[in-house]
Amino acid sequence: MQKRSIVPIVYILFLMLPIYWLVAMSFKTTNEILGGFSMFPQTFTLENYKVIFTDPSWYWGYINSISYVTLNTVISIAVALPAAYAFSRYRFLGDKQLFFWLLTNRMAPAAVFALPFFQLYSAVGLFDTYWAVALAHCLFNVPLAVWILEGFMGGVPKELDETAYVDGYSFPRFFATIFIPSIKAGVGVAAFFCFMFSWVELLLAKTLTAVAAKPIAATMTKTASSAGYELGLLAAAGTLTIIPGAIVIYFVRNYIAKGFAMGRV
Amino acid sequence: MKTENQKAWFFVLPVLLLVAFNALIPMMTVVNYSVQETFGNNQFFWQGLDWFEQILRSERFHAALGRQFLFTFLILIIEVPLGIAIALSMPRKGIWVPVCLVLMALPMLIPWNVVGAMWNIFTLPDIGLLGYFLNHTLGIQYDMTQDPIAAWITIVTMDVWHWTSLVVLLAYAGLVSIPDAYYQAAKIDGASNWSVFRFIQLPKMKSVLTIAILLRFMDSFNIYTEPFVLTGGGPGNSTTLLSIDLVKIALGQFDLGPAAAMSLIYFAITLLVSWLFYTLMTKDDLN
């Protein structure tokens, strides 16, 4: 144990405190929460979780969120793979300008796009579907995926492509069976970031849905205000939104630092 | 070496179409609104650049913009050095590395409104862990619904909690890419810790730090959900940042023209500052 390891330990404690408080509160009864301060749940209860798992308006929120996030991740990676390959292997007219333009879309405040998005997706008849949110989130996820994948592809020597052609591979076969497996880690990291940014975004997801595709985060804000701020229930719902992210991050833990570093600026 | 090949455009086409659909059509709508006046019955009148002039002269906009710059400035000045310091003190190998990384990344994976709600619960004066500790254990008067300073400290702390890990992860990624030989050479030369940092680690982290600063600038400048859930822009207007004000005008008052003009000015400022950061930080590379 070195002296300097105190810094990360203190930092992680600081990160965990609010999370601990959320989790602790989710196991308390409403009476206990409003009755006063208690460090640990005095009367441990699973009532809050029971409400969420038995009430369709709650658990459908989770199903909706996971559905559009998964759809978005699949679309983003599918279109970003060939594009990233083009950027990493070829020069073509307007390539640099296009790359920069893609990145500027990450700079647009979601608040700017909320209303036009609502009108656009209503006009094409996708309002309140998974597709609406999944496609809208492509605005910031596709550029990010292209950026990350391009970084990883740049690390694969060009000889790999040439050898494959000499061996008589067609391009689609080479791409699917040789090239993509060689940048597995990059695909994992890009998918992780797409999942993350789609999962945490609320403003657009809320604007583009009403009932059928409503995300869990939006269910939370509504229930919180209509039921007179049931803190225990809110805390339980919040705790459950942390779990998918925690699972995904566990799978990419060894690549995450690398994934950040690979993108070109 | 990259080969010249115009057919590469076909590979880029799906991305281009998808992003253009999401970016250009809404942007055109915004431009369209920004030059017109409407009374809500689908009748529009040409307004020219009046809205832009009105927004640029309005004190409300200046105040929100000022708060936004102050917020972003505080975020960058705290998170970037803190993130670098934490990355420097992290272990380079061993079983603790993945543990650290997973725990540190966790706040970034929580939906933004849950982050706001979580900090709300955490800071409630009588029943929140932090609120109770400050008010009852330390005896400091703390209530962010009453006191603008407390509200500011809370939103800044929340953002530090939420996003410092991004800087840590990026800086850490830069650090682990430095070969051991560099450190050995520095040791032989008898270099101090500071010179190792200044002449080896900092230059090696430069490209990832550029990404970190750009991302933190863009995201903190566009922040909406977390402070909206936590403080609702209050008390008064003290934490009404630019995008909170924008949503108030666009969806609250349904003033489409001024809101659209404000959106475009907002976007232009974000682009301009990002470009400035980018040029300043990559200037040396070109020479």
Image (cartoon, rainbow, N blue to C red):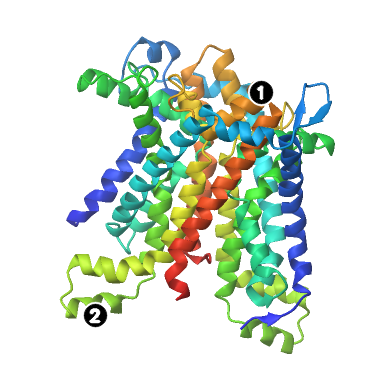
Quadrant occupied by the N terminus of chain A: bottom left
**What SS does tag 1 mark?**
helix
Q: Name the residue type under label 2.
A: Ala
Cα gap from disc 2 to disc 1, whole angstroms = 63 Å
**What SS does tag 2 mark?**
helix
Q: Name the residue type under label 1.
A: Ser
- Indicate the quadrant where residue A99 lies: bottom right
Residue B102 shows in this picture? no
Q: Position of residue A167 (x, y in %)?
A: 73, 88
How many residues crowd mark 2 within 10 Å: few (<14), some (14–19), many (20+)? few
* Residue A166 marker: none
Nearer to us in this view, B272 or B197:
B272
User: Which residue is located at x 61 percent, y 40 percent?
Assistant: A110
Q: Position of residue B243 (x, y in %)?
A: 55, 34
Residue A100 shows in this picture? yes
- Indicate the quadrant where residue B199 lies: bottom left
Q: Position of residue A44 (x, y in %)?
A: 40, 20
* Residue B185 marker: 2
Chain identifier of the residue bearing label 2 in the image: B
Q: Position of residue A4 (x, y in %)?
A: 21, 55
